[in-house]
Amino acid sequence: MGVSSINYNIRSFLLGKEVISSPKKIFKVLYIFCIMKLLVVGDFHGELPSFIERIMKKEKIDLVVSNGDYLPFHYRKIWFKYCYGTGLELWEVIGKKNYQRLIDRELREGENVLKKLNKLSVPVITVLGNADYSDPDDVADYGILPGQIEKSSWNFEKNRKDYFANLIKKYKNIHRIDYKSFSYRNLVFIGARGHSYPGIEESNAFSRSLKILSMLFKKFSKENKSGEVIFLSHNVPYKTKLDKIGMKANKLVRGKHYGSKLVRKIIDKFQPVLHIGGHIHESRGVQKLRKTLCLNLGALHDKHYSIVEIDNRKVKVRMR
Ligand SMILES: [Zn+2]
């Protein structure tokens, strides 16, 4: 039997007598019958443990999905002590020189994780985390965050959101998808950040982010009816069991829901098959919000990760 008649038989089997001319389309249809296996990791904080490669081989992983936070955040303690909720910038506390040195080290250690991810045998898709030296500007405008007065007057700080984002661009196996989409086989990923707090719904940034995401979701619900949409963001959806801050945290946020309102709105409206987020390490778990299975994968820094299997609209999550 010739190749073309095999193709024809597959086509007829899948689509009755309708013939699809493009091989790309045939693959897309065939992938519906394949199980996709994702390794879901994030909150690296400066490390990619070597056991990850072993797991990838053992599980035959098709794709790595990451919710960001590559930088170690070595300054966590001092930042919470002097800057959190006070409006003070860290460089005002430790001096510009020390600050630049500290950021250089943060970026270097974060980039080491990227280098290792770039060498993996399957593509990696990611969004930026709040520790990735990124602006708060996806869910709030400058000057309206409580305790945050103005955009920094120092140029080094003004351009902060570009540093790590530019580093990622160098690594061709890593695809950053904040406010973009990425298609892989029959899956479509849509990405956001959602930053590290609920976000301010009245801000221009919030409505801008909401608009972009809504456009992307509408586009894919029209164009790709059979494809499953997976929503990836750094933070988890607001007011769930996945976004509760632990009792050991800073007293300003202790015990509060601190997930993203932006992420929650999108999930409520568009019901993707799966949402992947993290950031709030202590509330690791899964929760169903109507048709969407939401996953807080915990931190790789604490040796946590998840394996997700997607078989058509069936999603199976194994948390480790
Ligand atoms: Zn984070």
Image: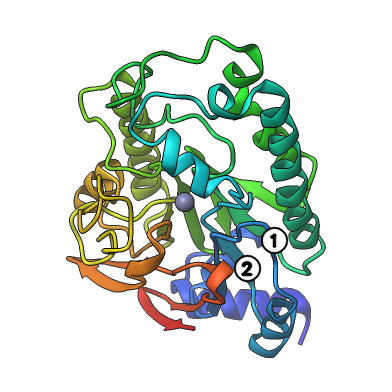
Residue type at the position of mark 1: Pro
Q: Is residue 316 above or below residue 112?
A: below
Is any part of residue 57 visible from this angle? yes
Question: On the image, numbered disc 1 is attached to which residue?
Answer: 123
Q: Is residue 312 above or below residue 251?
A: below
Pick the residue in front: 93 or 242: 93
Q: Is mark 2 within 8 Å of ligand 1?
A: no
Residue type at the position of mark 2: Leu
Q: Is residue 247 left or right of residue 225?
A: left
Task: Point out residue 71 in the picture as x, y percentages from the top left corner.
Answer: 63, 49
Q: Please, what secondary structure does the residue beneath circle 1 have?
A: loop
Q: Is residue 140 left or right of residue 43?
A: left
- Give the residue drawn at x 40%, y 47%: 220
Task: Point out residue 153 in the picture as x, y percentages from the top left corner.
Answer: 54, 9
Distance from the alpha carbon under mark 2 to that under mark 1: 6 Å
Q: Tag 2: Cα neighbours inside 10 Å, few (<14), some, or many (≥20)?
A: some
Please say if the residues under marks 2 and 1 sit with CB atoms less than 8 Å apart.
yes
Q: Tag 1: Cα neighbours inside 10 Å, few (<14), some, or many (≥20)?
A: some
Task: Point out residue 111 in the picture as x, y percentages from the top left corner.
Answer: 75, 48
- Give the residue drawn at x 41%, y 80%: 317
Q: Please, what secondary structure does the residue beneath circle 2 have?
A: strand
Question: On the image, numbered disc 2 is attached to which residue?
Answer: 63
